[in-house]
Amino acid sequence: MKKDTGKTKKETAGVCVQCGKAISVDEAIIIDEKIYCKACAEKIKMDEEKPKMLHKSAKNRMLGGVCGGLGEYFNIDPTIVRVIFAILLFVPSLRFWFMPLIYLLLWIIMTED
Ligand SMILES: [Zn+2]
């Protein structure tokens, strides 16, 4: 006689805090005392390994999101970045096209948020 109890139903460790999926004990991955499923844990790991990228800001955007992105990157108020940009725009020793060119270059190299 074979015993088949506890074979079909896996013991659940909890619910993934990221996606809300119920996870079994052998699938659960705990990061910072929170339970994640394998897929979410992998995603978090990838995000951590990814270096901080200079990106255009989605929430702090006026023109192309460049100033907002710079502000977020350097942890400063995007308004300050815009003011600096505006001031530099009128610095007589800089060519009139210099700052727009910088802005354009940043806009090209920065990825979308
Ligand atoms: Zn998950």
Image (cartoon, rainbow, N blue to C red):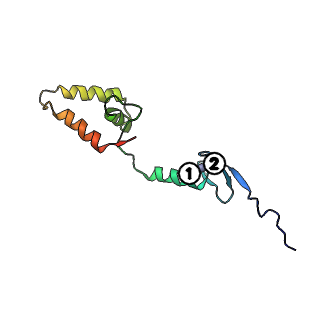
What's the residue at 62%, 45% (across, down)? 17
Quarter of the C terminus within the rendering: top left
Instruction: Measuring from the top left, give residue 5's x and y in whole percent.
Output: 83, 64
Residue situated in front as seen by the camera: 2 or 92? 2
Q: Label 1 is placed on what type of residue?
A: Cys
Is the CB atom of the residue marked by disc 2 within 8 angstroms of ligand 1's nearest atom? yes
On screen, residue 112 versus residue 7, left or right, reads left
The mark that comes first in sequence, 1 or 2, is 2
Tell me the residue that label 2 is attached to. 16
What's the residue at 39%, 46% (across, down)? 52
Instruction: Measuring from the top left, give residue 55's x and y in whole percent.
Output: 36, 41
Quarter of the N terminus within the rendering: bottom right
Instruction: Measuring from the top left, give residue 110's x and y in whole percent.
Output: 32, 42
Q: How many residues crowd mark 2 within 10 Å: few (<14), some (14–19), many (20+)?
A: many
The label on residue 40 is 1
Q: How many residues crowd mark 1 within 10 Å: few (<14), some (14–19), many (20+)?
A: some
Instruction: Measuring from the top left, give residue 11's x and y in whole percent.
Output: 74, 57
Residue situated in front as seen by the camera: 54 or 63? 63
**How many numbered badges does the structure rendering display?**
2
On screen, residue 103 versus residue 35, left or right, reads left
What's the residue at 47%, 50% (across, down)? 48
Q: CA distance from mark 1 to mark 2?
A: 8 Å
Is the CB atom of the residue marked by disc 1 within 8 angstroms of ligand 1's nearest atom? yes
The label on residue 64 is none
- In the rendered structure, are the residues bearing label 1 and label 2 in contact, judged by CB atoms less than 8 Å apart? yes
